[in-house]
Amino acid sequence: MVGVPFINPLSLEGREMVRQLGSLEDLTHDNPELIGIVTRSKSQDISDDQDIPRNHLELALKRLEWYVKKRNNPNFNYRKYAFLFQGDIEKFDTISFYLLSQAIGVKFGPNSRESRLMAESQGSLIQNRLEELNTRNREEIVLKALQELLSQGTLKWTFFEDLLSSRRIQLSDLVLDQGEVIMDQDDFRERLGPRLHHRDPDKMYQLLIGEELRELILIQMVMQQTENYMAEVHEKSRLMVEPNPLLLQLADGVTEILTQPTPSYTGTGKVARQSYRGPLNREAFPPCVKTALEGIKSGGRNDAIVLFITPFVSYARLCPDIFKQNVTVRVSDKDPQLQVVHQEVLPLIYEAAERCVPPLFEDQPQEKININAKIGFGMHSTLKLENEGETKWYTPMSCEKIKLHLPYLCRPDDDCKKIGNPLIYYNRKNWILSREQAESGDKKEDEGSSGEEVMENQDNDWIDV
């Protein structure tokens, strides 16, 4: 049976493994035991020596690389990373977890996309590792890990805000007593047993608090612990004269993974036609966007600028294929230093606000804060990376909502037919314009085959992260 650190590296047992660790420099040397575990893993598909992590640092990067590739590619080859789900790797994996968490905490800090992906990857690893276990071992390890986590204090229902908002669980799924979530069987028996007349408390516990719910809560708690740990590391690193070079080297490896070109996929798993990513092409804007950018001359300024233009401009510039993706994204996933946001996105929004009559910020300066909130940076007057995630990055409203709430913007043209969202209009129009431009260039150069090549590239090109 696997140990708790395989599921929760931050457990007491996992922390003890780290305390017994020797010099950090040893972790960069090839480790025959680790290499043996990787190469002997069941179902392992190793076609290149570069796929084999030879030391703790390389294993740390493989953990994150697995998640990033799995997250972006439905055709991803799991067998290249089968070693991550073998219990024999627990000791090496636990050390690698701490190395990666510390590197991200030192270099990138809390609220960064790197720290978010680290926490998400740990949650995904737990889920996949549990699925590899037989039913008995799975239940035992979940129970053991949860008991240790729950022994550290009470659990308020508000802790599950993310799970509730994503609808992965309902509030009615939780067993509450005075606002505290009851997960432990002994706690359930002690608190609620006397209130259950003519019913077996243990059977009711199994009925009300099922295995799936326990696993969801375990994963959520470990992800939160991971975020907390990276935040602690970040605070401690501020007191250091200079971080360990190995951690900085590992952080550079994280950056390299996250800056690799990533293909966009359709729902069928095929590479999608490239959505336009680059400086905004105003020729491709739908009529409603063009009208709003000219400035609203009557009522409805706030909704037009904050609720409509802000999501449209930000997604059109940074993530035009959001409706094809099956994951949640943040602005920093596409613009890590927020340079594009500050230099292109916000200025265009502010220009539209200035063209309103009267200018929007002249009598309602607080709307700048609301704009920041709609991009995902909370209710702050200044848009800063450290505040990302306090609010959600709102996607552009659909055509139906525009007709209902902003009817004065809806003046459809022929291209609006069968289009359900202004962002889809923008992507389609860009593709048409780029095709026409390519065909025009082909005629000038008298190269008859180029137009077909451009069409093919549009279907198979890559989209940067």
Image (cartoon, rainbow, N blue to C red):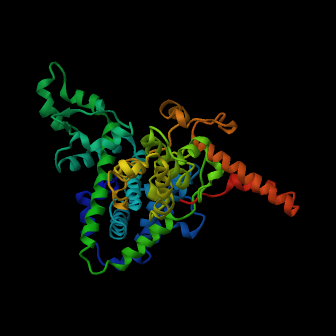
User: Where in the figure is residue 354, as x and y percent of width and height?
Assistant: 46, 52
Residue at the extreme top: 198
User: Where in the figure is residue 357, as x and y percent of width and height?
Assistant: 46, 45
Q: Is residue 32 above or below residue 276?
A: below
User: Where in the figure is residue 306, as x and y percent of width and height?
Assistant: 43, 45
Viewed as shown, does residue 370 lie left or right of 325? left
Q: How many marks?
A: 0
Please state which of residues 75 and 136 is positioned toward the viewer in this rendering: 75
Which residue is painted at 38% across and 77% down in the image? Answer: 246
Which residue is painted at 41% across and 72% down in the image? Answer: 250
Please state which of residues 42 and 115 is positioned toward the viewer in this rendering: 115
Note whether residue 159 is visible: yes
User: Where in the figure is residue 86, as x and y percent of width and height?
Assistant: 43, 56
Which residue is painted at 38% across and 62% down in the image? Answer: 93
Note whether residue 327 is visible: no
Please state which of residues 102 and 329 is positioned toward the viewer in this rendering: 329
Q: Is residue 277 above or below residue 35?
A: above
Viewed as shown, does residue 42 lie left or right of 456? left
Please state which of residues 24 and 239 is positioned toward the viewer in this rendering: 239
Quarter of the rendering containing residue 92? bottom left
Quarter of the rendering containing residue 45? bottom right
Q: Is residue 195 above or below residue 288?
A: above
Which residue is painted at 21% across and 30% down in the image? Answer: 202
Viewed as shown, does residue 222 lie left or right of 358? left
